[in-house]
Image: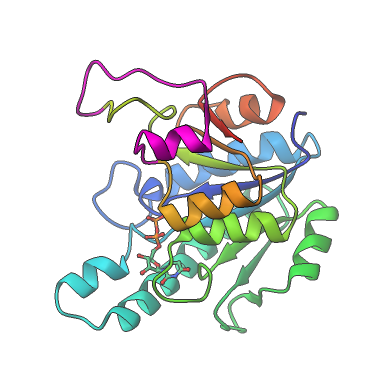
Amino acid sequence: MKYKRILLKLSGEALMGDRQYGIDPKRLAEYADEIKQITDRGVQVAVVIGGGNIFRGVAGASKGMDRVQADHMGMLATVINGLALQSALEDAEIPTRLQSAVKINEVAEPFIRRRAMRHLEKGRVVIFGGGTGNPYFTTDSAAVLRAIEINADVILKGTRVDGIYTSDPEKNADATKFDFISFDDVLRKGLKVMDTTAFTLSQENELPIVVFDMNKTGNLLKVVSGESIGTQVNL
Ligand code: UDP
């Protein structure tokens, strides 16, 4: 395997499957199967999950809600998704721990870096819920932060497009995909990979990012095995 320890970032929206809202159990089970393929091969897996399928702080604030209050709701949404994913992983017989950045002790362990790393060494999947625990951040920032903290080899951003394109492939038929791109070129060309805070944190800490289509069976294993799919962002 090319990577020994990965951080997988899944958006909340990905969990909706074909639905307009909430969580699709079928999609969750598919993701659990994908993750099992790599844990079975000894890869250590941490997951950061978004909350956009349930609540986004910016959306709440745009309707007049206090932004910090709205972001707290968004953070709790990521804990809900984390619980759902934990349940699906355990159904697939993958030992899993959920750690939350906001204290919610009856429901999830608090985030403790050393404990998280111990879980990973023991072959448990660790899901990080609650984002960074701070308002005005995104789960992309949480993903990069946790990846650096646990010394992950790479951050794998599972999306519904198969990489980074010259422009939005869902809007522009002429868009072409990059196999590799540098952090500088992403910024220079104004391409959207993650929000700027998350992206520059990754760049400054020399943490490579791979953007790939998580909804295609076998893709996660391919990326982790070192097959060139998706787009790799390197220094
Ligand atoms: N959030 C936050 N701080 C964080 C991470 C997330 O306040 O560190 C809130 C924020 O309101 C955000 C919501 O949680 O809109 C859901 O996260 P995100 O939008 O990143 O989810 P995704 O787009 O990946 O589904």
Residue 191 counted in the magenta span: yes
Residue 230, position as x, y percentages in the image? 50, 26
- Taking the image as drawn, is residue 213 in sight? no
**Res 115 quadrant in image:** bottom right
Apparent side of residue 220 relative to residue 191 in the rendered image (left or right): right
**Which residue corresponds to the image point at 65% horizontal and 54% vertical from the top-left?**
147
In the rendered view, tell whether residue 175 sits above or below residue 194.
above
Specify the quadrant of the image occupied by residue 153. Answer: top right
229 to the left or right of 35 = left
In the image, residue 132 lies at what x, y percent?
A: 53, 70
- The picture places residue 83, in percent across and down from the top left corner, at 53, 65
Q: Find ligand 1 in the image and state its quadrant.
A: bottom left
- Residue 1 sits inside the magenta stretch: no
Q: Which residues are magenta?
A: 170-192
Q: In the displayed structure, would residue 132 be above or below residue 95?
A: below
Query: Which of 142/38 is in front?
Result: 142
Image coords of residue 111 (percent x, y): 66, 73
Identify the residue at the far left of this view.
63
Q: How many marks?
A: 0
Q: Nearer the viewer, residue 113 or 188?
A: 188
Split into 4 quadrants, where in the image is the N terminus?
Answer: top right
User: Is residue 219 among what the camera can see?
Assistant: yes
Quadrant of the drawing holding the C terminus: top right
Q: Main secondary structure of the magenta part?
A: loop
Q: 47 or 124, which lies in front?
A: 47
Q: How is the image coloured?
A: rainbow
Residue at x 32%, y 83% (from the top left corner): 69
- Above/below status of 122 relative to 171: below
